[in-house]
Amino acid sequence: MKYCFKIIASLFLLSALYACKGNTNYRLEEGIWRATLKTSSGAEIPFNFEVTDSAGQKVIDLINGEDQFRVNEISQHSDSVLIRMPLFDTEIHAKIKDKTLSGNWIKHMSDSDMVMPFEARHGESWRFFKVNSAQEAKLSGRWSVSFSTADHDLREAGIGEFEQKDGRLYGTFIRATGDHRFLEGTISDKKIYLSAFDGANAFLFTGKLLNDSTIVDGMFYSGFSLVQNWTAKKDDIAILPDAYSITALKDGFDKIDFSFPDLNGKKVSLSDSKFKNKVVLIQFFGSWCPNCMDET
């Protein structure tokens, strides 16, 4: 009798476990999500995305201000979700459970992979704070920005362009090598928060508004480990260094020349006769670079 009771109890326990497992929601819910990527220093880079149905297939739109970047290569097996970014060699591997995602964003590079912890929750449209506090600060406009490494050995000039609207902050930072894409954030307790994730890069900017014309204690996080300091002054006529002053041929060279195989394996050289007495436009870019793709 005792043996039969043990068997019945075991069967009941197994049934309960399977029932619980069956009730777990592994569906990638449509609607808005809030996600974060964690840096090596513990800072969290927040962003939002929206899941919709397109012709029977799930698609994701990464949201950064007014910019939306569509991702349509999404696969799921049971509780495992794989989100591959178009154009850029990056992807999100995550486990889904009850309207949450947990995993990693992986960026494949030439010699290694950059891996950042990833978390997301369905139904949350806020980015930094659930409620944005009212602010009298006026950040809209153009700012002269100075970036520096943590030891202040390396400095670089930049420009900040911000637009303040309904408690939210939008804009970008521009450097001689390009801009930091479409940033979205807010101002809270005289502190500035801006972030962006476009499938290729993850950025976070924070700073303290000293007054309406000065930003101090700025921190810039890029990817898993890059950290820089920054400060800014309101400057409607701020400009970047002249591009020609920072771009030049190496000593001993008086022209650009190269040779390489084209897509058909045929050798192409800038000194080929077909280019003689013609203006040749050369574009140097990386397929992993969103700004380069925009330019192309």
Image: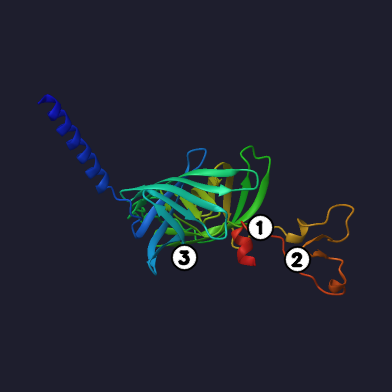
Residue for badge 3: 66
Tell me the amino acid under the disc marked 3.
Glu
Q: Is residue 275 above or below residue 244?
A: below
Residue nearer the viewer, 143 or 12: 12
Q: Which is more N-terminal, label 2 or label 3?
A: 3
Q: Which is more N-terminal, label 1 or label 3?
A: 3
Q: CA distance from mark 3 to mark 2?
A: 31 Å
Q: SS at mark 2?
A: loop
The label number, if any, that marks residue 286 in the structure image: 1
Q: Residue at x 34, y 60 (%)?
A: 30
| Left/right of residue 121 with respect to residue 64 in the rendered view | left
The label number, if any, that marks residue 282 in the structure image: 2
Residue 237 appears in the picture as rendered = no
Q: SS at mark 1?
A: loop
Q: CA distance from mark 2 to mark 1?
A: 13 Å
Tell me the amino acid under the disc marked 1.
Gly
